[in-house]
Image (tube, rainbow, N blue to C red):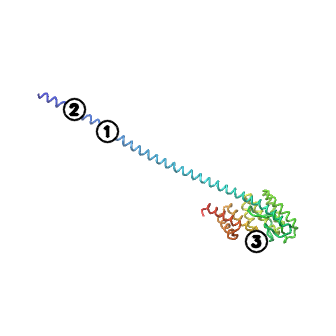
Amino acid sequence: MMKRLANSFAARLGMAGALASAMLFAVPVLAQDSRLSLADRVARLEQQAQNRDQGGIGMVNQMQQLQSQVQQLQGQIEELRHQLQQLDDKNKAQYADIDARLGRLEGGSAGAGATAGSSPQAQANTPAASAKGAATDHAAASEPGNNPGTAADPATVQAAYDVAFKAIRSGNYVEASREFRSFIQQYPDSALAPNAWYWLGESYYATTNYPVALESFQRLLSQFPQSDKAPDALLKVGYSQIELKQFDAAKATLKTVTTRYPGSKVASLAQERLQRLQLQSGG
């Protein structure tokens, strides 16, 4: 009896020992599983953070690309505007010739008074070597009527002027500038002298020689302020200043055009160009 009890107790002790041993082995395994799970979670969080960073960098790159594309488009728009302006100026020069010929037909006589594109004013000019200038949008350079203040034969003066105007009308701006310089030098007191200064400026403006163009238009304004070409010349001074990046001066000039010649075509053109300039410069 006692022996049987002893054997039963021994068996129970063995089972307890085996259970304890199993538990001792299970504890590090559970601890290891717990450590691996925590490491996995940390790794997962790090990966998510990295993905977010990469996503942010990608958005920044996309924004930079969009900004670059917008700048390129703005540059293309400005280039197209400039080309349109040049075409507009050239078309106006062509229309000027039509106006001149109509004026010649209506005037009837080459000895009549100054017509739509010329002024009867006569003042002495310096040699045309210092003349420079370029395009604008008004004209009547080849019109009749003219030489009350010169001793030269009116027909000879008109013929010389027509040669120069024919050159600019055909787009031969180099020849036109040479002929207009020659005309100014030979006939500084002619009633056509203001027109010659203006179209001399046109010839330089059309070839993008803006500093010389600006000087020619300014010479016209200083020597013939009452000329019929003065409004156009003042507008072209503003245009030339824009091309030379003299934006503050250009704004002032264009504002002067609008206030000095209200309701005129040049005032409308000046106002439109002034608005574009203010938009481009932010005010």
Residue 226 is tagged as: 3
Cβ atoms under marks 2 and 1 closer than 8 Å? no
Q: Amino acid at mark 1?
A: Leu
Closer to the camera in the image, 78 or 220: 78
Residue 15 is tagged as: 2
115 sits to left or right of 12: right
- Residue 17: image location, x then y, percent: 22, 33
140 sits to left or right of 244: right
Closer to the camera in the image, 48 or 120: 120
Q: Amino acid at mark 2?
A: Met
Above or below — where is 245 with respect to 150? above
C-alpha distance separating marks 2 and 1: 22 Å
Q: Nearer the N terminus, badge 3 or badge 1?
A: 1
- Residue 169: image location, x then y, percent: 79, 58
Q: Secondary structure at mark 2?
A: helix
Q: Nearer the N terminus, badge 2 or badge 3?
A: 2
Mark 1 — residue?
Answer: 30
Residue at image position (19%, 30%) is: 11
